Image (spheres, grey):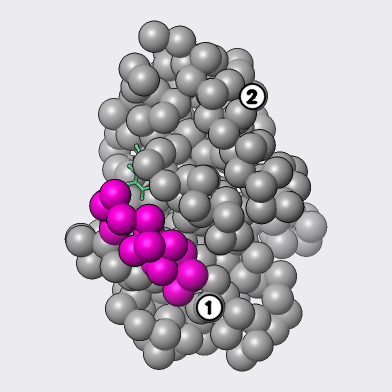
């Protein structure tokens, strides 16, 4: 199996979907979802140009990326799996972005620990950069029911994130249902876009909400058509095709 070959194929499909949708490839980040993937394979993906990686468990991420990060300072590491409150501190101090913010009570916890990132940065500019990037996860139909359950809860979450001093909202994340039915998948992505539009209107500036993290190995072309700015691809990169 060749990881660089897999990435080339995924890349070709993204470019084709961009062409069909009249979008620019440069507006979309390709994340390698590296859960269960050993470091040597992550290194191969890095060699093929992937800089953003997604992990679902803290312990596994620390084990794999602590040293990796020292040798690869441009690493952009995101947490995409459900976060337990008692692990919030570890997560905040280790990840560049937490995409799986899915409960109101988690937000205060994240803000509290994010102030430790701020305190560690000596200059004002660095303090700005030390704010923790977060995405709000919206449940749009996928089975596990992770994510905020509706728009009201999502707006409340946005309010709390913006009232915190140490969190930087970047946008939204969702998982479409795992199905062959393209209409259901599309419906899920459209809900996320609709939520984004509402957030832009209610909680300007729009830059707070530019990232739409949607699209996985089985549905990323639909996600590109619907406006995704970040594709989270695991199997398509790291598994035998
Ligand atoms: C595992 C996972 C992915 C990647 O799924 P693939 O089908 O392997 O591409 C994307 N997003 C989340 C939240 C995941 O847990």
The image shows residue 118 at horizontal and vertical percentages of 61, 60
Q: Is residue 83 visible?
A: no
The answer to whether any part of residue 144 appears in the image is yes
Of the pair 20 and 150, the residue shown nearer to us: 20
Q: Which residue is mark 2?
A: 49
User: How many neighbours does mark 2 have within 10 angstroms: few (below 14), some (14-19), or many (20 or more)?
Assistant: few
**Residue found at the very far top of the displayed protein:** 1
From the viewer's perspective, is 12 left or right of 92?
right
Which residue was labeled with disc 1? 194
User: Dot 1, how many residues are within 10 Å of its Cα: few (below 14), some (14-19), or many (20+)?
Assistant: few
Q: Which residues are magenta?
A: 177-191
Task: Please identify the dominant SS of the magenta region.
Answer: helix
The C terminus is located in which quarter? top left
Q: Nearer the viewer, mark 1 or mark 2?
A: 1
Q: Residue at x 30, y 78 (%)?
A: 149
From the top left corner, tell me how far across and down residue 190 is, in percent.
49, 70
Q: Is residue 179 above or below residue 150?
A: above
Displayed-image quarter of ligand 1: top left
């Amino acid at each position: 199996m060749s990881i660089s070959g897999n990435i080339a194929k995924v890349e070709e499909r993204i470019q084709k979907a961009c062409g069909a949708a009249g979008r620019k490839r440069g507006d979309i980040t390709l994340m390698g979802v590296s859960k269960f993937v050993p470091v040597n394979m992550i290194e191969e993906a890095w060699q093929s140009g992937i800089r953003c990686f997604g992990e679902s468990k803290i312990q596994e991420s620390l084990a794999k990326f602590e040293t990796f990060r020292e040798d690869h300072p441009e690493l952009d590491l995101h947490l995409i799996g459900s976060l337990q409150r008692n692990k919030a501190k570890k997560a905040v101090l280790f990840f560049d972005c937490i995409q799986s913010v899915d409960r109101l009570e988690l937000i205060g916890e994240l803000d509290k620990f994010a102030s430790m990132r701020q305190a560690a940065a000596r200059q004002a500019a660095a303090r700005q950069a030390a704010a923790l990037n977060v995405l709000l996860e919206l449940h749009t139909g996928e089975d596990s029911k992770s994510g905020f359950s509706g728009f009201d809860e999502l707006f409340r979450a946005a309010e709390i994130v913006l009232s915190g001093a140490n969190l930087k909202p970047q946008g939204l994340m969702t998982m479409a249902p795992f199905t062959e039915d393209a209409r259901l998948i599309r419906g899920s992505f459209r809900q996320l876009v609709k939520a984004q539009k509402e957030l832009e209107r209610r909680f300007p500036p729009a830059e707070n909400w530019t990232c739409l993290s949607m699209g996985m190995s089985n549905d990323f072309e639909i996600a590109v058509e619907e406006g995704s700015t970040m594709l989270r691809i695991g199997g398509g990169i790291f598994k035998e095709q």
